[in-house]
Image (cartoon, rainbow, N blue to C red):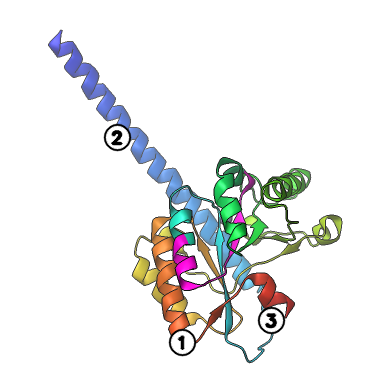
Amino acid sequence: MKRKVNVVMAVMTIYALLSMLQTRDSAMKVKETIAAGREAVYREENYVKTKNTGNKKIAITFDDGPHPQYTEQLLEGLKERGVKATFFVTGEHAELHPDIVAKMSEEGHLIGNHTYSHIQLSERNREEFKNQLIKTNEIISGITGKEVIYVRPPYGTWDKKFETELNMFPVLWTVDPLDWCSDNAACVAERVVSKADENDIILLHDYYETSVTAALKIVDRLQEEGYEFVTVEDLLVE
Ligand SMILES: [Zn+2]
């Protein structure tokens, strides 16, 4: 009997190890694909940057949340520092954590749309992508009572026709430290601070603990340099 239990345990361990390896492998593939997509966006210089205004304004933005733990930590840190940020939430995560979305809005942050399930626009899924934007707008507005105007399309893939069809505007980014593939917050912060300039839009993700730690380091250092953190709307509308 005991031997049988041992054999079952051994098989279970091997199975668990194998599935861990597989998960790691596919996670790596996903990261490589995202990196390639981002690279392409850069080459096309497909981003928005306003002209210099003389004010040292900068926007910090967070995608993919809200995360039940890390986003709360981030909101606390931003409040302590008097910083207004922009959050591009997915409909899926907003539905799971409406209280956090409400808090973002109450604390003066701007909330944008990052699709419902984080899909990338392609020639084949235009309708689905559009429906996800509409559905996510409804979820966010249902929580905050405010209209959603800004969208950060996952991987930066966008169709300009949506702007008139949905009255929504894409907000890309100008500083990307690739925070999602690093577990070194100091290194992520350094990548941003060394590049940051007036009117930049910093891309981070509130879905990772490292990113939240890095974000607060970035805020502290750039505030010391005299930067004021504003929402993307304040940056783009000016
Ligand atoms: Zn994303």
Question: Decide: marks 2, 3 in contact (CB < 8 A)?
Answer: no
Considering the numbered disc 2 on the image, is that residue within a helix, a strand or a loop?
Answer: helix
What residue is rendered at 48% in x and 55% in y?
71
Q: Estimate the x, y position of residue 94 in percent, counting from the top left.
A: 60, 46
Query: Can see residue 194?
Result: no
Q: Distance between the residues labelled 2 and 1?
A: 48 Å
Q: Residue 155 carries which label?
A: none
Neighbour class for label 3 at 10 Å: few (<14), some, many (≥20)?
few
Question: Decide: marks 1, 3 in contact (CB < 8 A)?
Answer: no
Neighbour class for label 2 at 10 Å: few (<14), some, many (≥20)?
few
Q: Could you tell me the amino acid type at mark 1?
A: Glu
Quickly name the residue at label 1: 225
Q: Is residue 55 above or below residue 215?
A: below
Quickly name the residue at label 2: 17
Q: Could you tell me the amino acid type at mark 3?
A: Thr
Decide which of tag 2 and tag 3 comes sooner along the chain: 2
Quickly name the residue at label 3: 50
| Range drawn in magenta | 76-91
Please state which of the two labelled residues, at mark 2 or mark 3, is closer to the viewer. 3
Q: In this view, does 25 lie to the left or right of 91?
A: left
Q: Is residue 147 above or below residue 108?
A: above
Q: Residue furthest top?
A: 1
Does residue 111 belong to the magenta stretch? no
Q: Estimate the x, y position of residue 116 in percent, counting from the top left.
A: 65, 45
Q: How far apart are marks 2 and 3 (CA)?
A: 50 Å
Please state which of the two labelled residues, at mark 2 or mark 1, is closer to the viewer. 1
Q: Could you tell me the amino acid type at mark 2?
A: Leu
Q: Which residue lies furthest to the bottom in this view?
A: 54
